[in-house]
Image: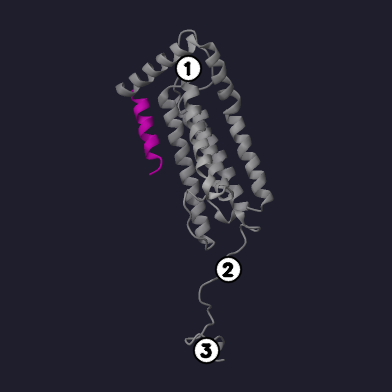
Amino acid sequence: MTSVPFALALVLVESRWPPLHRLDQATAERLHTTALAHPGWVRFLGVLSDFVWDPATMRLLVAVCVVWLLTRRAWRLAAWACVTAVAGGLIGLLAKSAVERARPHLPDPVAHAPGFSFPSGHAMTATTSCAILLLVLLPVVPRMWRPLPWALALVTVAGVGYTRVALGVHWVSDVVGGWLLGVAVVTATTLAFEAWRADTGRRRTTMTEGLEPELTEPEPEAPQADTGPSADVGPHGRTGAGGAT
């Protein structure tokens, strides 16, 4: 079900749905006019897009996070982060190759980008990377400070989308498609991770506490103590065969 919004966006893009097509064209032309009139703004957006929020930068942050998880002996969480990042990259490339949508062609372009346009690789990588970092690191952030990383992640994801459209290398629908596909990938791998946790007897978690709340413990993946009734407890609460003392 998590892939349905992306599938709908793909159908609308492929069919060149008139309202979406008009939105793409109007937004691209308006932002391009602004870019041509403000070269300093274009340079700033280029630094954000090509360095600060570049997919290589985002993946490097995830790689550093994975190394840290390995030092914490959080093997399952490290595996989840790797699988999510790699799967997101590969699925994004496959989607681009399948759709083969051309990038915007604007007069006097202020930026260039290779490859196809839908979905936006920058937008998808920002979505998956920020989700990985959030879901991994939230347990080690004090509860009162947790809105801050959420806000930072949202600004990053939205900012990446804006820069790509403002620089004229993506349509709005490309960015939305990247966001939706990124969310679908993270949701799928997170559900698999939750099933993995359940198989080891751990409780379900919420997005506000991260995937592995036990990450704050010295041995985050140590077996959970069995707090249920022992198999050899007799009917009167006495241990031993047949309940004898």
Q: Earlier in the sequence, mark 1 or mark 2?
A: 1
Above or below residue 123? Residue 72 is below
- Indicate the quadrant where residue 15 lies: top left
SS assignment for the magenta stretch, majority: helix
The residue at the point 53 percent across, 38 percent down is: 130
Q: Secondary structure at mark 3?
A: helix
Q: Which mark is residue 225?
A: 2
Q: Earlier in the sequence, mark 3 or mark 1?
A: 1
Few, some or many C-alpha atoms within 10 Å of disc 2 (few <14, some 14-19, many ≥20)? Answer: few
Viewport quadrant of the N terminus: top left
**CA distance separating discs 2 and 3:** 23 Å
Q: Residues within 10 Å of mark 1 (few under 14, many from 20)?
A: many
Q: Viewer-nearest of labels 2 and 3?
A: 2
Q: Which residue is most to the front?
A: 144
Q: Magenta segment range? A: 1-16
Residue 98, position in %: x, y? Answer: 45, 29
Q: Residues within 10 Å of mark 3 (few under 14, many from 20)?
A: few
On the rendered image, what quadrant is the C terminus found in?
bottom right
Q: Which residue is mark 1?
A: 168
Residue 9 falls inside the magenta stretch: yes
Residue 7 at what x, y percent from top left? 38, 35
Do the numbered discs 3 and 1 sit on residues whose CB atoms are within 8 Å? no
- Its colouring scheme is one colour
